[in-house]
Amino acid sequence: MRGDGGMQDATLHDRLARRGNMMNLEGSQLFPYPNAFLNGIVLVGLLSVLKFFTVTTWNLAVGLRAHVWSKLRNKNFVETYGQWAVVTGSSDGIGKGYAYELAKKGMNLLLISRTMEKLQKIKEEIEKEFGVEVEIMQVDFSHGKQVYEEIEERVRGKEVGLLVNNVAVIVPHPMNFGEVSEHQLWSHVNVNVASPLAMTRMILPGMLERDKGAIVNIASIYGRYPVPMVQVYSATKAFVDFFSEALGSEYENSGVTVQTVTPAYVSTSMTSFSEKVHKPRFFVPTASNFAAHAVDTLGYTSYTTGYWTHGLQAWVMDTFFPRWVWMKFLKKNCEDLLKDLKKTKEE
């Protein structure tokens, strides 16, 4: 009996061995070169790590050059770009901040915005403080094509060395697309999309004739990813981003500098619907503080968030999370902001 049991054990052992050999054979057919497969995985991992450190090092170098080195240099804006700067959307927020910073650099200003009372006050303050020439124009860019003839007349004969395409509109608070009115829709198109095209087309030829000048296009960090609940604004800023980068590539050897600026939240009237994104703090600079940093980056980088903490935000967004994660996060953020707004109104 024991002998029969031993034979049965041996037979079972042989069967298991044969099955193991068959599995090994099947495995070898799937992965005929197991060492090469593992080496490939290791190589891909090493290349990914190398890419991460290379890109991070490059971004750090660009950031230091834009936000640190630029502050150690005292560039003559009038000599480098020209006598006049044209700033759209300059009666408030980032545009107003740019106006003051460019006046500090000694540039004369043509300020274009909707509210004449605000423009007049800014004109008086800048002329008194900096002694530069300031001209103002009341223009509503939402009216479309008809406004540009008058602007062109005012620009004619001026050595416009710097154009800041800043004017923009956004819905008063986050909302679904079905809630966006037809007027709001066309305002986004006329102001956010058409104005940088028309203003650039108007002023660029003079810069090319003089072989110098700069065009600054204010886009948004909301243009880097699709943002639900501010979808039209997000899409128009993506347009500005793409247009600006393509323009810069076309004219990179012309003597004309094209810079794309993609800020995150800045404490302006656009963010006034929520205390969370309007109150100045570490990641939410005042418009004047933002402009002071952003203007200094001109000539040192063609693409910037304009402010170093916004650069950190963009780096995290671009490096660690896929697009769909950020879309969900930004949607949730907009929903929370809308809840806060409704709660504030109820109180």
Image (spheres, rainbow, N blue to C red):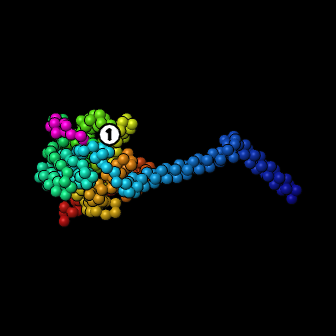
Q: In the picture, residue 338 is in which quadrant?
A: bottom left
In depth, the one of 138 and 215 nearer the eye is 215
Residue furthest right as drawn: 3
Residue 150 is covered by the magenta coloring: yes
| Residue drawn where x is 24% and y is 35% of the image | 202
Which amino acid type corresponds to the residue marked 1 in the rendered image? Lys
> Residue 21: where, in percent of width, then height?
75, 46
> Residue 173: where, in percent of width, then height?
23, 53
How many labels, in total? Answer: 1
In depth, the one of 44 and 88 nearer the eye is 88
Q: In the picture, residue 101 is in which quadrant?
A: bottom left
CA neighbours of label 1 inside 10 A, class few (<14), some (14 to 19), many (20+): many
Q: Is residue 171 above or below residue 337?
A: above
Residue 226 is covered by the magenta coloring: no
- Residue range in magenta is 149-160
> Residue 264: where, in percent of width, then height?
33, 54
Residue furthest bottom as drawn: 347
Residue furthest left as drawn: 117
In depth, the one of 86 and 138 nearer the eye is 86
| Residue drawn where x is 72% and y is 46% of the image | 24
Q: Is residue 268 visible?
A: yes
In depth, the one of 333 and 312 nearer the eye is 312
Give the structural element (helix, strand or loop) at label 1: loop
Query: Which quadrant, please, contains the C terminus?
Result: bottom left
Q: Which residue is mark 1?
A: 212
Query: Which quadrant, please, contains the N terminus?
Result: bottom right
> Residue 247: where, in percent of width, then height?
35, 37
